[in-house]
Image (cartoon, coloured by chain):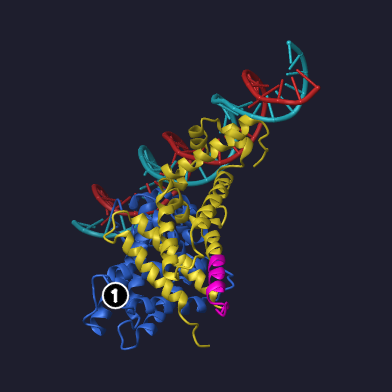
Chain colours: A yellow, B blue, C red, D cyan
DNA sequence: ATTGAATGCGAATACATATTCGCATTAGGG
DNA sequence: CCCTAATGCGAATATGTATTCGCATTCAAT
C-alpha cells in the first residue's frame, strides 16, 4: 500500500476496493480480476486505486489478510477441543470446510484452487498450521504420551488431503458422489490414520 | 488443429512445437507460455504455428494427449496387480507418482497444479479413472465379495488425497518433511482406508 | 523441368491490461 | 471562512499478447 488512507473517504474507498476485488474474483476468476475492472466495480477511478495499492497483487494480498481473520474466527468457534471423540471432531471440521468452500460465491474455492500463484502462501499454509496447532493441542490433551515426532507428517498429509479433496469435489459441481459421502469417507480415513499407532522404526 | 500436416517437414514442425510448448511450460509456467515464445523456441514463425493449431489451448491440449500416453505406459508397467499386498502395491504407486512429479523439469507438476484451467480435465480425472479401474480389478481379484457401491467414493478420496498431497510437498521444495516420510504416511493412511470394512448403513 | 498445392514467414493489426501524471476537487484544522 | 494537504480523476502511455494475411519458398507429382 503506497499511501496510508488518512481521511474517512479514503479509508472507505480502501474497503470498497477490497469488496470489489472479492467480487471480481468470484465473477471473473483470478485471471479476469483486473485493476480496471476492480476500480470500476468499486465505483472508483484506476488512479485512485493506485494511490493506495501497488496493483492487483497488493489488492489480493490485503483481501486475503481480511479473509484470514474471518476464517480464524470460524475455526475458533468449532468445538474442536471438546470431549467429543476424534471422529466427531474431524467430521465437524470437514463440514465447516465444505461450508466455507460453498460460501462467498465461490471466493474461497477460487483462492484455494489458485494457491500456487497467490501472493502469499497463506491459503493452504495458514490452514495447515492452524490445524497443526489444533491437533497438537488435541493430542496433548487426550493422549499425553502421543509421539509428537511424526505428528507434522500426519498433519501435512491430512490437511492437504482433506482440503484438496474437498476442493476437487466442490469444483466438479454435479458429481455422482454426494458431498456427505465424501465428508464421511474423509472423516473415516483421516480419523483412523491420526489415531493409528506410530510405525515401527 | 486447423490444417493437417501432410508433408514431412510440417509433421516435424508439429513435433517441434509440442516440444517447445513443454519447454515453455516448465520455464515460464502456464501463464508465461505464450504463442510467440513457443514459436520462437521451436524455431518456427508464429504464422506457421497458427497454421496447425488454433492457439495456446490447442497446443497444450495436444501436448497433454501425448503425455497421457506416456503416463499410461508407466502405470501399466507397475506391478499393481501382483500378488503383493495392498500396502506394497500402494507404496509402489505413490513412489511412481513422486517420480513423475520430479521428472520433465517440473512439467507434470505445473500441469497438475493448474488442473482447473487446463483445456481438458485430463490431468487429475484421467489419473483418477485409471486408478479407479485398477482398484476395481484389484478388489475383484483379491476380494470377490468386495462391496463395489462405495468404491467410487473411496477412490475419489484416495486419488485426490494422494495426488495433491504429493504436489503440495514437491512444490514446497525444501520441506522439513522428507519425501519418503510422506510416501509412507500416505501409504498407511490410504491402504488402511481402502481395506476398512464398509460403514454400517 | 514444370506447376499447383503445401508450407513457411513475420510485419501489421487489434486488443487487453497495467500504470502514470497533471489537474480538479474536497476535507477539515486554524 | 480560508488554505493547504489530501484525495480523486481518467485520458494518455507503455507493454504484452493473440491472431491474421499477402507474399515467398519448397515439395512432389507429372
Identify the residue at horizontal 35%, vertical 52% (top origin).
B53
- Magenta stretch: dominant secondary structure: helix
- The picture places residue A163, in percent across and down from the top left corner, at 44, 62
Residue B201 vs A112, above or below: the answer is below
Identify the residue at horizontal 37%, vertical 67% (top origin).
B67
Element assignment for label 1: loop
The quarter holding residue A10 reads top right
The answer to if A56 sits in the magenta stretch is no
Output the chain of dot 1.
B
Which of the two residues, A72 or A174, is positioned nearer the viewer here? Answer: A72
Which of the two residues, A42 or A148, is positioned nearer the viewer here? Answer: A148
Q: Would residue C26 appear left or right of B85 to someone viewing this image?
A: right
Residue B139 vs A190, above or below: the answer is below
- The picture places residue B189, in percent across and down from the top left corner, at 42, 76
Identify the residue at horizontal 38%, vertical 59% (top origin).
A168
Q: Quadrant of the N terminus of chain A?
A: top right
- The picture places residue A9, in percent across and down from the top left corner, at 61, 29
The answer to if A139 sits in the magenta stretch is yes
- The picture places residue C7, in percent across and down from the top left corner, at 34, 54
Q: Which residue is mark 1?
A: B198
Residue span colored magenta: A132-149
Which of the two residues, B168 or A71, is positioned nearer the viewer here? Answer: A71
Amino acid at each position: 500500500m503506497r499511501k496510508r488512507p488518512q481521511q474517512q473517504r479514503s479509508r472507505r474507498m480502501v474497503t470498497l476496493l477490497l469488496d470489489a476485488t472479492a467480487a471480481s474474483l468470484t465473477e471473473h476468476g483470478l485471471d479476469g480480476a483486473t485493476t480496471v475492472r476492480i476500480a470500476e466495480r468499486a465505483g472508483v477511478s484506476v488512479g485512485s486505486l493506485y494511490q493506495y495499492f501497488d496493483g492487483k497483487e497488493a489488492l489480493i494480498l490485503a483481501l486475503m489478510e481480511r479473509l484470514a481473520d474471518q476464517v480464524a474466527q470460524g475455526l475458533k468457534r468449532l468445538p474442536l477441543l471438546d470431549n467429543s471423540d476424534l471422529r466427531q471432531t474431524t467430521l465437524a471440521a470437514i463440514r465447516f470446510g465444505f461450508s466455507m468452500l460453498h460460501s462467498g460465491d465461490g471466493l474461497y474455492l477460487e483462492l484455494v484452487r489458485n494457491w500456487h500463484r497467490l501472493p502469499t502462501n497463506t491459503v493452504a499454509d495458514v490452514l495447515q498450521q492452524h490445524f497443526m496447532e489444533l491437533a497438537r493441542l488435541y493430542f496433548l490433551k487426550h493422549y499425553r504420551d502421543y509421539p509428537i515426532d511424526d505428528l507434522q507428517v500426519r498433519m501435512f498429509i491430512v490437511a492437504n488431503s482433506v482440503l484438496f479433496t474437498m476442493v476437487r469435489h466442490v469444483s466438479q459441481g454435479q458429481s455422482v458422489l454426494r458431498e456427505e459421502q465424501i465428508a464421511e469417507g474423509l472423516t473415516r480415513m483421516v480419523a483412523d490414520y491420526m489415531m493409528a499407532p506410530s510405525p515401527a522404526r
